[in-house]
Image: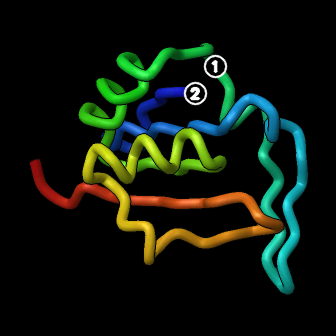
Amino acid sequence: MKLTTVRGEVLLAAADEGIVGRTLREGKIHLHVDRNFYFGVRSDRKLFVNSLRMCTIANLVGENVVTIAEREGFVDRENVLIIEGVPYAQFTILER
């Protein structure tokens, strides 16, 4: 996962380790799970959940990270895209 600040927003990008570097394709959708964007540090569940609570924007790829975000109430499964069998979710917190 990688936590960065962009224009005053806290961006969390996280992907399951096994899909980093892959390009996922589904119809017109192409998503490259770029190591430079999605990977900064390896994290455990606790660090990841704390990062979800801190961020204002999240970009999540993979069954593990999307499921954790869903269980913690950040993502609704019905709004998750499936790209080449891999869950992909984004969310934004508009106000804190």
Please state the horizontal and vertical placement of residue 50, each as a whole percent of the image. Answer: 30, 24
What is the C-alpha distance between the residues marked 1 and 2?
A: 5 Å
Please state the horizontal and vertical placement of residue 36, each as a whole percent of the image. Answer: 75, 30
The crowding category of the residue bearing disc 2, from other C-alpha atoms within 10 Å (few below 14, some 14 to 19, many at least 20), is: many
Number of on-image labels: 2
Judging by the rendered image, the residue that carries numbered circle 2 is: 1
State the residue lying farthest toward the left: 96
Q: Are marks 1 and 2 in contact (CB under 8 Å)?
A: yes
Please state the horizontal and vertical placement of residue 55, each as a whole percent of the image. Answer: 32, 38
The correct choice, above or below, for 16 with respect to 86 in the image is: above
Residue sitting at x 26%, y 32%: 54
Which secondary structure lies at badge 1?
Answer: loop
Residue sitting at x 60%, y 14%: 41
| Image-quadrant location for residue 52 | top left
Left or right? Give the position of 77 relative to 73. Answer: right
- Tell me which label, 1 or 2, sits earlier in the chain: 2
Q: Amino acid at mark 2?
A: Met
The correct choice, above or below, for 7 with respect to 3 in the image is: below
Judging by the rendered image, the residue that carries numbered circle 1 is: 40
Please state the horizontal and vertical placement of residue 26, each as a whole percent of the image. Answer: 83, 77
